[in-house]
Amino acid sequence: MAFEVGIDSSNIGEISNEERNESDSLNLRIEDGSVEIPSVKFCCQKKKVTLVPGGSKQLLADKDFSTTIIDLPHALISEILSCLDPKELGLVSCVSTCLHRLASEHHAWKEFYRERWGLPLVLGAASSGFSDESERSWKKLFVEREFRSWTFLGRYSIDTLYGHTEAVRSVFLLASAKLVFTSGYDSIVRMWDLEEGLSIAASKPLGCTIRAVSADTKLLVAGGTDGFIHCWKSLDGLRNLFDLTGFQKEKTEFRLWGHEGPITSLALDMKNIFSGSWDMSVRIWDRSSMNCVKTLRHSDWVWGLTPLETSLASTSGSDVYIWDISSETPLAIIHDAHEGTTYSLARSHTGNFLFTGGEDGGIKMFEIRRYGSETSVVLISQWMPHTSPVYSLSFEFPWLVSASGDGKLALIDVRKLLKTNRHGYPKRVSSSTVEPPQRMLHGFGSNLFSVDVGCDRIVCGGEEGIVRIWNFTQALETERRARALKGMRLENRMRRRRVQMEMNAKSGRPDQCSIAAHKNPINGDRNRAWHSKRRASGKAKA
């Protein structure tokens, strides 16, 4: 294999025969992540430098061979492609057939998907319109999910759910099962069908205000002002997973107690239950034994928490804590994140980005950076979309949704802030820089206490005792039809173009489109009469 590099002969001095016959010993082999280059001879000619394998005695002509990236080993090409972002990787897949196969089947697409939305569950994939990864590539899953993320800028319809008799304090959207759980001052946990907007079941009165609800496909938990965590296990074969009414013979409801004050926040992962309370603590419960295994002490009331793998973020008073769960010690503390209380918290799927909302009506975005054993927090951006406290935040890439006491929802697109080099950091902003939100949703005259996002929908509840669902699936269908029509028009245009070229070839006539393009280039001379006249008329109008 020979590599040709063009060199200006005017900048190169005379080269002796001894120098031409010199060879540097290099090794090219991929082994354990290192790259070795085999021995080659550097043969210099007047205009070009040709790299010839060391065993070859023949001097190659100027244009005998040319090497491109597809001639490299596939393992090396894969390492190069892993340094690209999704847009760059998609562009590379359009270059050639070989690169299309390598880029489309690259393992980076799975990592891109996981970084943004987490790995889909089997139930979630089936119900959300995504198929199993064995049937569809990760690139197709990523492209479809990225396409769906733009729907929040389109049209929507609003479904209004009535059932609560007092204010709704908490809403939770279980996207994988298409269920919505709500609770509030009336001490009842309600379960709703997301598609139909109908009430499926309601629990018995629990005797206190229920301020927090969380669920997955195995467990439903609700926490109230009595300090108890009310739990329901799912039942196999039950369509709606949970028996809130107690009609089933099998007993699935139980309670956990350990907090000495009202419970304000709840979260679940595969192994633990996390609960935050006004007793200034976060308790971690083991799901197998249902015992409290760890307690994280704070300096003020705990308002929100978000766990991720071995770390946990929580808000206490005006401060934000990032904890190492195993050692029960804070890795970093953001003091006075907001003016007044920091009420709400959200986190990206990778855990690197943290969003906070406070009593001052502001929203801030932080990045958690780790350097070995040290952890630092950097402010990335901030917004002031509300005139009242931000009581709730929910994040699904790339949209951050906030609910406030001013009765408004703010939609913030953080895509541009995350569009950086995969191995680099976003730019740090000045504390005086305030970004505007991309969209505001109105229609409430009172406080909004909770919001959640998923499945092309936004669910919120507030002081009115009404649950509203913004449905953006109409925008998704409209965009799909528009793209399908655009594809059909492009296909018809290309078909007519091919027919015209075939007719011109049979008749011996030149291609009229090529002649017209040659006579009227797109970026042609701007000093011609038509452009001069256009400029003159523009000046006259001015």
Image (cartoon, rainbow, N blue to C red):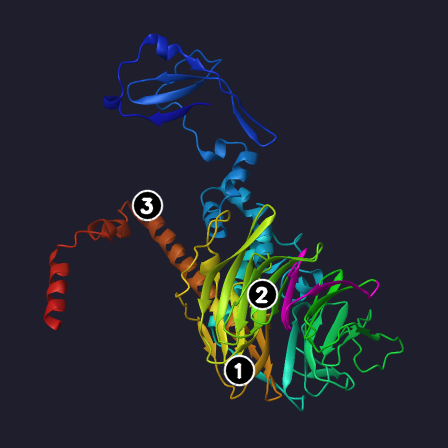
Q: Position of residue 236 (x, y in %)?
A: 82, 69
Q: Residue furthest top?
A: 18
The three-letter code of the residue at mark 2 reads: Val
Q: Nearer the viewer, mark 1 or mark 3?
A: 1
Displayed quadrant of residue 68: top left
Q: CA distance from mark 2 to mark 1?
A: 21 Å
Badge 2: how crowded within 10 Å, few (<14), some, or many (20+)?
A: many
Q: CA distance from mark 3 to mark 2?
A: 72 Å
Q: Secondary structure at mark 3?
A: helix
Q: Which residue is mark 1?
A: 405
- Magenta stretch in the rendered image: 289-312
Q: Which label is found at residue 505? A: 3
- Real-space CA distance between mark 1 and mark 3, rounded to the nearest whole angstrom: 71 Å
Give the position of the C terminus as an image quadrant.
bottom left
Residue at (60% x, 51% y) in the render: 110
Q: Which residue is mark 2?
A: 320
List the single residue furthest toward the front.
Answer: 299
Looking at the image, is mark 2 or mark 1 earlier in the sequence? 2
- Front tag of 3 and 2: 2
Neighbour tally class for label 3: few under 14, some 14-19, many 20 plus, Cα within 10 Å:
few
**Label located before the other in sequence (3 or 2):** 2
Residue 455 image point, x, y percent: 60, 70
Instruction: Give the main secondary structure, helix, strand or loop, of the magenta stretch.
Output: strand
